[in-house]
Image: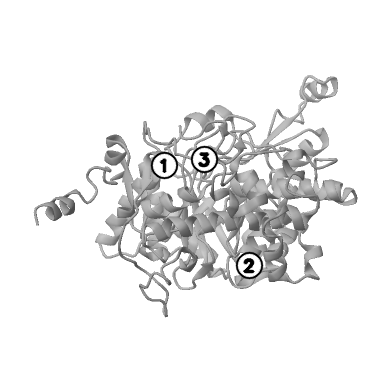
Amino acid sequence: MRFSKNNDVLGTTNRGNAAESGLCTLCRADCMGKCETWLSSLVGRKLLYPRDFGAVTAGANNTTHVGVSYNSLRIQGYAYGSHGLAKGLSSDPDDCIFPNVSLETEFGTKKKTKARIPLMTGALGSTFVAERYWDSFCIGASLVGIPVVIGENVVGVDRNSEIGAGKDKKGKIKVSPELDRRINGYLRYFDGYGAIIVQLNVEDTRNGVAEYVVNKYGDKCIIELKWGQGAKDIGGEIQVTSLDYALFLKKRGYVVDPDPTSPVVQTAFKEGAIKSFARHSRLGGTNLSTVDQVREDFMSSVAYLRKIGFERITLKTGSYGMTELSMAIKFATDAGLDLLTIDGSGGGTGMSPWNMMQSWGVPSVLLHAKAYEYASILAARGQKPVDLSFAGGFALEDSIFKALALGAPYTKLVCMGRAVMIPGFLGSNIEGALHPERREKLWGNWDKLPKTVSEYGNSAEEIFASYFDVQKKVGKKEMKNIPYGAIAFWTLADKLACGVQQLMAGARKFSLDKIDRSDLFAANRETAQETGIWHVCDANDETAKKILIS
């Protein structure tokens, strides 16, 4: 593994075990630090470099690569050339500087959706973490100019939503305060970059989420069909500790385990033997048994969504096997969808069975390599493959570059779930500590600033490296409405963006459309074989030998 618990060079440490992404396997909202993503949310791009400059030297320790993973891919650099410079810039060294690297991207078919950096959030749905810290997540993403995804079941778990029965005896949303709050929170600062994407699962479809969204918000929202995610191959789950709430969710039509209507279970809960209930969503596609049936059902769903008014439609799929991957790419392409997010195993979630996360599905790097292969087959047949977003255990700038290059030219975005939630937690904790009157509303977990934060300052202006960048964008007067979690989100995004710019400049690529698979090489033969990326000793080897004998 590339990551150990402590990184002496950056002065970071993981509270728990480090995953492939560099995040702790268990990320806590009350964490006092300080993994690389946590600290980046405070100091931003400063964390791109070793600490204590002038008193230290530093050297890489990531020189041994074992196994097949994104960490066994390395990034090429070049000693000459420049590609993709913006109009008006020349190949002069004064223009070929990393701040001139453009990170703007876009995806879609008929109507393009733009993003300032090639990043989007994972689906933030019915988990209480997503609800509590939503303002930080959505305002931060909106200010940065990237898409944010409202995940499944937001309406169904909201006690204040009203769902009536239609002519077909299926429940249809009349009022959805939580869904409205989430959409409007993002749109308040939307300036043409990014998007709000609303996800559908079985229960959401039954409840009429799509109809509610299109009737109230029109083309301001993108609708997303969901086939799964990289952390699990069953429906979404949350855990509740109230018998009354468990009964409410059961009445709403969810699978609740154990069954809160059972007298035995109720007795066990009252006596303390059972302390919580798990709410589960249903599996999709259970009434389909052939590829042709899946295709027909999928195309019918897309046609219906277009009929009721959605211009932009996306699909999210998980780390199933190659059959499902090929279907997702082919069907999304044929249907003219705007984006396909492919989430590999190694990603995370708010609540999924632990050993399922550990054991099921296709690891991200393998799934994404096959996605490139399958998209290329369609391209060779004259089709334009659906634009792709890769997800599944990403947190750092080098991972963004690697994912974009591995799937180039089809990959337009990288999807981050857990990583971009950390600044929301951290900022809320800081704001609650500095302003106790806001603590309960913000779900702040600290009574006072821990030393890991106070060493950088005792006010928002001192603590967040990007505070004044945000203030410049929204104005000094509006800053009072920006949660500290959104400022932290911007600060992390700025660090990631700067890091990607530097990697791209080293590869002599000054726009995202110039990145390709030749910008990577594999550090071991097995990774080369499985991904189709050339081995370090094979990369440009023929060209090198021609130079030697010229």
The three-letter amino acid code for the residue at tag 2 is: Val
The three-letter amino acid code for the residue at tag 1 is: Tyr
Q: Secondary structure at mark 2?
A: helix
Q: Please give the name of the residue rendered at 53% of the width and 58% of the height, measured from the top-left corner.
A: 497
Please state which of residues 184 and 454 is positioned toward the viewer in this rendering. Answer: 454
| Mark 1, other Cα within 10 Å: few <14 / some 14–19 / many ≥20 | many
The three-letter amino acid code for the residue at tag 3 is: Ser
Asked whether disc 1 touches disc 2, contact meaning CB atoms under 8 Å apart, the reply is no
Disc assigned to residue 21: 3
Quickly name the residue at label 1.
70
Left or right of 377? Residue 423 is right
The relative height of residue 510 versus residue 207 in the rendered view (above or below) is: below
Q: Secondary structure at mark 1?
A: helix
Mark 3 or mark 1, earlier in chain: 3
Question: Is there any visible trace of residue 169 in the rendered image?
Answer: no
Closer to the eye: label 2 or 3: 3
Q: Please give the name of the residue rendered at 60% of the width and 45% of the height, measured from the top-left corner.
A: 37
Rounded to the nearest angstrom, the CA distance separating label 1 from label 2 is 38 Å
Q: How is the image coloured?
A: one colour
The relative height of residue 205 versus residue 481 in the rendered view (above or below) is: above
Furthest toward the left, the residue is 549
Rounded to the nearest angstrom, the CA distance separating label 3 from label 1 is 9 Å
Q: Please give the name of the residue rendered at 38% of the width and 59% of the height, measured from the top-left corner.
A: 410
Q: Secondary structure at mark 3?
A: loop
Please state which of residues 222 and 90 is positioned toward the viewer in this rendering. Answer: 90
Quickly name the residue at label 2.
214
